[in-house]
Image (cartoon, rainbow, N blue to C red):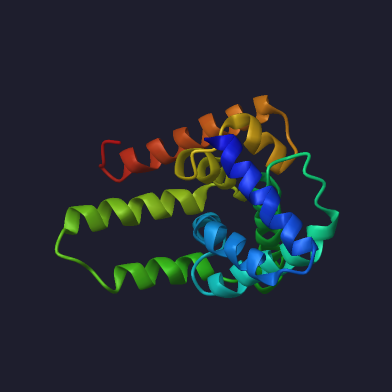
Amino acid sequence: MQAAKDTSDWELIQRCLNGNSQSFRQLYRKYQQSVRNILYPLCGADLLDDLVQEVFIRAWKGLPRFRGSAQFSTWLYRICWNVASDQRRRCARQHSQTQNLALRSDIAHPGPDLMHLHYQQALQQSMAQLSPEHRMVLILHDLEDLPQKEIAEILGIPVGTVKSRLFHARATIRQHLLQEGITP
């Protein structure tokens, strides 16, 4: 099943390189939600649409250099990491509070289940405490269900580092939830 997915991506890429922009739209539709899911916890909601577009613009421009030595998704997620890193640097210069604004926005629209909201808030706060490197590993592994080897390829780090970051990220989140009185 995975091979069919890769073949489909490869065929779409080849069509794009031959001038078929509709094929890139198909790749966009296929991966845009995953890109959003990766960028949101790393960068917040304020610029999410712009950052998603930046990822796909970079992918479009870089497509002629895509060698196919990795899956298209691996290559695209690496672009996500680069866009998120660039955004983090911009925010650090401006000392932006985008994650806090996103958190306040979520809290401003409470639903009927206050315990669920408390858990969501505590989880977002604990994610915000993680370094971007730890957060990215956790997102790719636990939310996107990527294998550790592929995460290592995306981030350009050894598999052992992925395992270590995953362990420490989970431990940090578990500790924060316990401090909030929530049993993970």
Q: Is residue 33 visible?
A: yes
- In the figure, residue 52 lies in which quadrant? bottom right
Q: Is residue 178 left or right of residue 18?
A: left
Q: Residue at x 65, y 43 (%)?
A: 7
Q: Is residue 86 left or right of residue 169?
A: right
In the displayed structure, 164 sits above or below 69; it is above
The location of residue 15, given as percent across then percent down, is 73, 60
Q: Nearer the viewer, residue 69 or 20?
A: 20
Q: Quadrant of the C terminus?
A: top left
In the displayed structure, 63 sits above or below 21; it is above
The location of residue 165, given as percent across then percent down, is 59, 34
Q: Is residue 133 visible?
A: no
What is the count of numbered marks? 0
Q: Residue furthest top?
A: 160
Q: Is residue 38 left or right of residue 125?
A: right
Q: Residue furthest right?
A: 65
Q: Residue at x 49, y 65 (%)?
A: 99
In the displayed structure, 62 sits above or below 149; it is below
The location of residue 101, given as percent across then percent down, is 45, 72
Q: Nearer the viewer, residue 105 or 141?
A: 141
Q: Residue furthest left?
A: 112
Q: Residue at x 70, y 42 (%)?
A: 155
Q: Residue at x 59, y 71 (%)?
A: 96
- In the figure, residue 14 lies in which quadrant? bottom right
